[in-house]
C-alpha cells in the first residue's frame, strides 16, 4: 500500500518565524490532506490538496503529484499554531493513510 | 451542527468487558472509517465501510468489529477489551473516490 513519510518529526520555532513541513508519498494519489491536531486532540482539516497550491491566511500548501510530495508552509508562526501536523494520502482504491506527523512547538 | 459525532468522549473500561463506540454523521457521506491513534504510530485504520451494508478490514482490525446498517451510523465494537486497545479512536467520513475526509472529536478509551 501507499507509504507516507513526514519531516521533520519535531520542530521548535520562535513566534514570528516561518516554517516548511514536508510530506512524501510512495504512489500516485487522488487525495492528499493536511490536518492540525490541536492540544485538545481535535483533528482540524487544513487543506484538501491532491495537486496544486492553496492558501488560507498564514498557511499555504503545495502538492507536486508527479514528484510525490506535498509541502505545508506556515508563515509568521503563532503560539496557537503549536500541535501536531499530519499529512494523509489516498491512492486509487486504497484508504486514507497517515504519516506519523510533525510536532510543532512555537515559543513566545 | 453538521459533521461527525462520536460518543462517549472518554471511557475507562475493565478488561474483558464489551464496549461499543458510536459514530454518527449527517453529511450523507457514503464512506466511513475508524482509526486508532497511538503515540509514535500516528493514525491507523481499523475498519471502513464504502456504503451502507458493506464493511472492510483496515490495517489493525483484530479485536474489533463494525456494522453499517444505514448511511449515518458506523458503530465500532470491542467484544472483549484488552489493555492494548487503550487508545484514542477517531471516526471519519467522506464521499468515496478520493474525496476530503472529515473527522469526529475522538473517543479516549482506557482499558484497565
Image: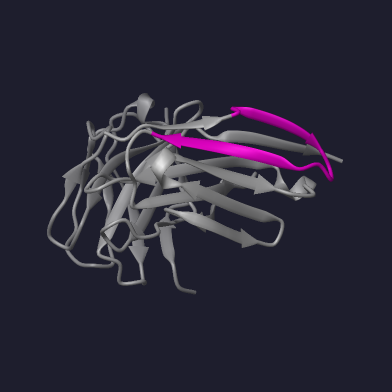
* Residue B10 horizontal/vertical position (percent): 48, 46
Q: Can you say whether B103 is above or below A13 in the image?
A: below
Residue extent of the magenta highlight: A8-25
B81 vs B42, left or right, is: left
Q: Quadrant of the N terminus of chain A?
A: top left
* Residue B67 horizontal/vertical position (percent): 18, 53
B71 vs B4, left or right, is: left
Tell me which residue sits at (41%, 46%) in the image: A65
Residue furthest right as drawn: A108
Depth check, front residue: B52 or A64 = A64
Residue furthest bottom as drawn: B1
Q: Can you say whether B29 is above or below B36 in the image?
A: below
* Residue A23 horizontal/vertical position (percent): 50, 37
Q: Can you say whether B87 is above or below A80 in the image?
A: above
Reply yes or no: does residue A9 show up in magenta: yes
Tell me which residue sits at (43%, 52%) in the image: B8
Asked whether the viewer can see residue A22, the reply is: yes
Depth check, front residue: B6 or A33 = A33
State which quadrant residue A66 falls in: top left
Asked whether the viewer can see residue A42, the reply is: no
Tell me which residue sits at (31%, 56%) in the image: B98
B32 vs B67, left or right, is: right
* Residue B75 horizontal/vertical position (percent): 27, 54
Q: Can you say whether A18 is above or below A48 in the image?
A: above
Tell me which residue sits at (69%, 31%) in the image: A11
Reply yes or no: does residue B57 show up in magenta: no
Amino acid at each position: 500500500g501507499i507509504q507516507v513519510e513526514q519531516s521533520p518529526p519535531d520542530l521548535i520555532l520562535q513566534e514570528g518565524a516561518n516554517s516548511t513541513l514536508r510530506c512524501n508519498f510512495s504512489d500516485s494519489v487522488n487525495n492528499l490532506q493536511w490536518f492540525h491536531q490541536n492540544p485538545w486532540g481535535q483533528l482540524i482539516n487544513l487543506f484538501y490538496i491532491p495537486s496544486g497550491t492553496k492558501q488560507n491566511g498564514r498557511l499555504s500548501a503545495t502538492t507536486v503529484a508527479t514528484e510525490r510530495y506535498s509541502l505545508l508552509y506556515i508563515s509568521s508562526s503563532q503560539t496557537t499554531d503549536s500541535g501536531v501536523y499530519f499529512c494523509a494520502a489516498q491512492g486509487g482504491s486504497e484508504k486514507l493513510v497517515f504519516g506519523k506527523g510533525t510536532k510543532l512547538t512555537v515559543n513566545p | 451542527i453538521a459533521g461527525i459525532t462520536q460518543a462517549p468522549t472518554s471511557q475507562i473500561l475493565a478488561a474483558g468487558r464489551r464496549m461499543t463506540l458510536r459514530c454518527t454523521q449527517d453529511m450523507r457521506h457514503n464512506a466511513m472509517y475508524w482509526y486508532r491513534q497511538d503515540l509514535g504510530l500516528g493514525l491507523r485504520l481499523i475498519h471502513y465501510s464504502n456504503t451502507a451494508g458493506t464493511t472492510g478490514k483496515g490495517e489493525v482490525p483484530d479485536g474489533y468489529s463494525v456494522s453499517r446498517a444505514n448511511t449515518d451510523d458506523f458503530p465500532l465494537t470491542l467484544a472483549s477489551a484488552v489493555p492494548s486497545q487503550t487508545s484514542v479512536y477517531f471516526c471519519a467520513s467522506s464521499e468515496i473516490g478520493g474525496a476530503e475526509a472529515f473527522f469526529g472529536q475522538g473517543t479516549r478509551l482506557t482499558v484497565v
